[in-house]
């Protein structure tokens, strides 16, 4: 039994903030941001969302699309999942939840009317979606559950220190979702790998959100350290997931979208061409736990991924955590 991705969905706030917009409020410019990061603009959840529902509403938008897409599959493709009430579990990967409790996953379970689903949140920052996939894979592989809705959602704009131009220009808000379903066919997750390299409390951190009111605790980052870590560890974990000699079978490496230079460096180190590394950081910035499922959904929508394609997802970030998932789509 394997866990197959049967559908995806993504949702970002309408409001975009361009590099030129940022240059009006801080000492930066479009040229610096583009050449150092590849980012052109990002989506930000501002007043269009009630303050206490930003993460929930972004996630809800992504989940609705993933469910719609799963239910719209041809009858012949429907095995374990036929309709939304077949969902057994909702797992949300987020580091910026609207509430400490209840979990965002519980709010989604109610709003989506998933009558029999359990629900919980997980937190592993930019590696969160990879971690959630590995948990969902284990549940399905062991036969505990058949259908799991996995969501990556983050509202990083909540944690941005707008006086720190070194971090403020990097991040955006968004959500991506995927439905994993038990399959006895060819498709499914082949291997998941998760690691933690330590030192994350110095290189990249944000205090828990309940501290923010008092001391405006925002994210802080040692950019060079995180960059070096990502460039070193991401190729390693991809090789571990793909095992020796399997890289040429991979159609796309869907990497966490943190910096185009990180993606280029990973491509170079793996000696794999850049056209195997799709990127949309230009339009979204770093959306943390949402970046991999948003990229995946875009490729699916554009018809660039077909059943049977070998894919490798890789995430890295605060922790310092990193991980990869190898799968046949
Ligand atoms: N606009 C203009 N100048 C900026 C700037 C901005 N937004 N941010 C920093 N600078 C300045 C710095 O102050 C520094 O000026 P100085 O030389 O006068 O001191 C100069 O640009 C170079 O800064 P530096 O930090 O050395 O740049 P860099 O090439 O290391 O790039 C990052 C900075 C953040 C883009 C890069 O380190 C990075 O991407 N790191 C990984 C971050 C990441 O991905 N985090 C999330 C992981 S999930």
Image (spheres, rainbow, N blue to C red):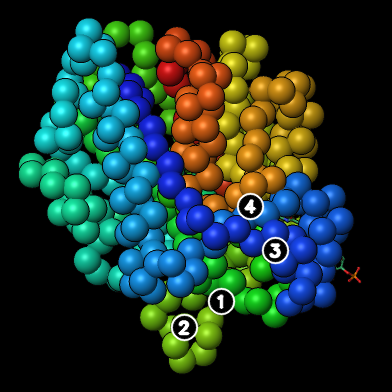
Q: How much space separates mark 3 and mark 1, taking CA atoms?
A: 14 Å
**Quarter of the image that includes the C terminus:** top left
- 316 w.r.t. 202: above or below: above
Name the residue carrying label 3.
169
Q: Nearer the viewer, mark 2 or mark 4?
A: 4
Whether residues under marks 3 and 1 lie with C-beta atoms below 8 angstroms apart, the answer is no
Seen from the viewer's position, the closer of residues 57 and 124 is 57
Residue reaching furthest left? 115
| Residue at left offset 48%, top offset 64% | 45
Q: How much space separates mark 2 and mark 4, taking CA atoms?
A: 23 Å
Whether residues under marks 1 and 2 lie with C-beta atoms below 8 angstroms apart, the answer is yes
Question: Would residue 65 be found to the left or right of residue 146 on screen?
Answer: right
Percent coordinates x, y for residue 233 in the rendering: 65, 41
Name the residue carrying label 4.
285
Question: Would residue 56 be found to the left or right of residue 277 on screen?
Answer: left
Secondary element type, mark 1: loop
Mark 2 or mark 4: whose residue is earlier in sequence: 2
Mark 1 or mark 4: whose residue is earlier in sequence: 1
Percent coordinates x, y for residue 67 in the rendering: 27, 35
Seen from the viewer's position, the closer of residues 323 and 152 is 152
- Ligand 1 under 8 Å from disc 2 Cβ: no
Name the residue carrying label 2.
212
Mark 1 or mark 2: whose residue is earlier in sequence: 2
Label 3 packing within 10 angstroms: few (<14), some (14-19), many (20+): many
Label 1 packing within 10 angstroms: few (<14), some (14-19), many (20+): many
Q: How much space separates mark 1 and mark 2, taking CA atoms?
A: 7 Å
Total labels drawn: 4
Q: How much space separates mark 3 and mark 2, taking CA atoms?
A: 20 Å
Percent coordinates x, y for residue 51 in the rendering: 38, 74
Name the residue carrying label 1.
218
Q: Which quadrant contains ligand 1? A: bottom right
| Residue at left offset 31%, top offset 51% | 60
């Amino acid at each position: 039994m394997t866990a197959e991705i049967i559908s995806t969905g993504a949702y970002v706030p309408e409001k975009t903030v361009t590099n030129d917009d940022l240059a009006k409020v801080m000492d930066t410019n479009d040229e610096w941001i583009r050449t150092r990061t590849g980012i052109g603009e990002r989506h930000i959840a501002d007043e269009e969302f009630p303050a206490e529902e930003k993460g929930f509403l972004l996630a809800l938008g992504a989940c609705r699309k993933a469910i719609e897409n799963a239910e719209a599959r041809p009858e012949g493709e429907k095995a374990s999942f036929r309709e939304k009430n077949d969902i057994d579990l909702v797992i949300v990967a987020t580091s910026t939840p609207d509430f400490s409790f209840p979990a965002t996953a519980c709010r989604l379970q109610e709003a989506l009317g998933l009558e029999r689903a359990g629900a919980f949140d997980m937190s592993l920052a930019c590696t969160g979606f990879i971690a959630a996939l590995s948990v969902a894979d284990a549940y399905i592989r062991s036969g505990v559950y058949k259908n799991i809705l996995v969501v990556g959602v983050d509202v990083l704009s909540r944690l941005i220190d707008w006086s720190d131009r070194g971090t403020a220009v990097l991040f955006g808000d968004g959500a991506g979702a995927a439905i994993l379903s038990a399959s006895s066919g060819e498709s499914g997750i082949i291997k998941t790998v998760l690691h933690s390299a330590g030192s994350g409390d110095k290189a990249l951190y944000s205090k828990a959100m309940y501290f923010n009111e008092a001391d405006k605790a925002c994210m802080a980052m040692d950019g060079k350290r995180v960059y070096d870590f990502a460039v070193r560890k991401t190729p390693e974990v991809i090789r571990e997931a793909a095992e020796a000699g399997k890289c040429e079978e991979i159609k796309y490496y869907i990497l966490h979208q943190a910096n185009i230079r990180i993606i280029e460096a990973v491509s170079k180190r793996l000696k794999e061409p850049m056209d195997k590394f799709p990127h949309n950081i230009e339009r979204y910035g770093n959306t943390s736990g949402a970046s991999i499922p948003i990229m995946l959904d875009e490729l699916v929508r554009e018809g660039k991924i077909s059943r049977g394609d070998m894919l490798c997802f890789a995430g890295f970030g605060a922790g310092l955590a990193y991980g990869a998932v190898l799968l046949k789509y």
